[in-house]
Image (cartoon, helix red, strand yellow):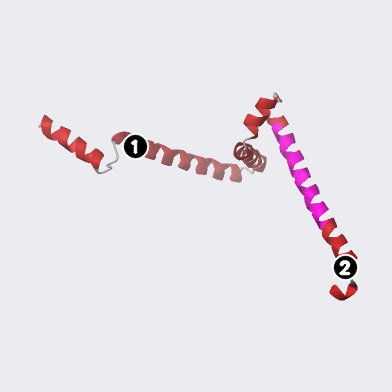
């Protein structure tokens, strides 16, 4: 019997059969997902919109990779500092948009009326 089990193990690996550990990890992830959704629903029920906002900010932080950069610059990296940083980024972006709009307007104004 032992020889046969060895053979089946080999075959499993050959044909990409998921081992027990992988299955376990999958179910763990599923459970985490369910828990997260449950928590979200609970937050919505209790109207903790500020919490979801903070989560969003944190996610943004992660995707922008500002953590590594700020740490290398030796800056403060507490939640408040990060929030302020994100706020500043947003302000900068809005200012850029405004500049673009202004330039577009100027372009239109300087055009010859027949071209308008």
Q: Kindly give the residue lying farthest to the bottom in the view shown.
A: 114
112 vs 15, nearest the viewer: 112
Residue density around tag 2, few if under 14, some if 14–19, many if 20 or more, within 10 Å: few
Q: For mark 2, what is the residue?
A: 111
Under tag 2, what secondary structure?
loop
Q: Which residues are magenta?
A: 82-102
Horizontal placement of 79 versus 1: left or right?
Answer: right
On the image, the x and y values in percent for residue 82 come to 70, 33
Q: Mark on residue 35? A: none
- The residue that appears at 12% across and 35% down in the rendered structure is 4
- The residue that appears at 66% across and 26% down in the rendered structure is 72
- Residue 50 shows up from this direction: yes
Contact between labelled residues 1 and 2, with CB atoms less than 8 Å apart = no
- The residue that appears at 43% across and 39% down in the rendered structure is 29
Q: For mark 1, what is the residue?
A: 22
- The residue that appears at 64% across and 44% down in the rendered structure is 47
* Number of on-image labels: 2
First of labels 2, 1 by sequence position: 1
- Residue 77 shows up from this direction: no
Q: CA distance from mark 2 to mark 1?
A: 66 Å
**Residue 57 appears in which quarter of the rendering?**
top right
Q: Kindly give the residue lying farthest to the top in the view shown.
A: 74
2 vs 29, nearest the viewer: 2
Q: Provide the major secondary structure of the magenta segment.
A: helix
Queried whether the magenta region covers residue 92, the answer comes back as yes
48 vs 112, nearest the viewer: 112
On the image, the x and y values in percent for residue 71 come to 66, 26
16 vs 84, nearest the viewer: 16
On the image, the x and y values in percent for residue 116 come to 85, 72
On the image, the x and y values in percent for residue 112 come to 89, 71
């Amino acid at each position: 019997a032992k020889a046969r089990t060895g053979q089946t193990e080999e075959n499993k690996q050959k044909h990409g059969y998921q081992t027990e550990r992988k299955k376990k990890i999958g179910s763990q992830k599923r459970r985490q997902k369910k828990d997260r959704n449950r928590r979200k629903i609970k937050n919505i029920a209790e109207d903790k919109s500020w919490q979801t906002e903070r989560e969003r900010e944190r996610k943004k932080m992660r995707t922008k990779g500002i953590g590594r950069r700020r740490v290398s610059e030796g800056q403060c990296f507490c939640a408040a500092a990060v929030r302020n940083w994100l706020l500043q980024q947003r302000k900068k972006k809005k200012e850029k948009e405004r500049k673009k709009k202004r330039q577009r307007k100027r372009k239109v104004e300087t055009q010859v009326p027949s071209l308008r």
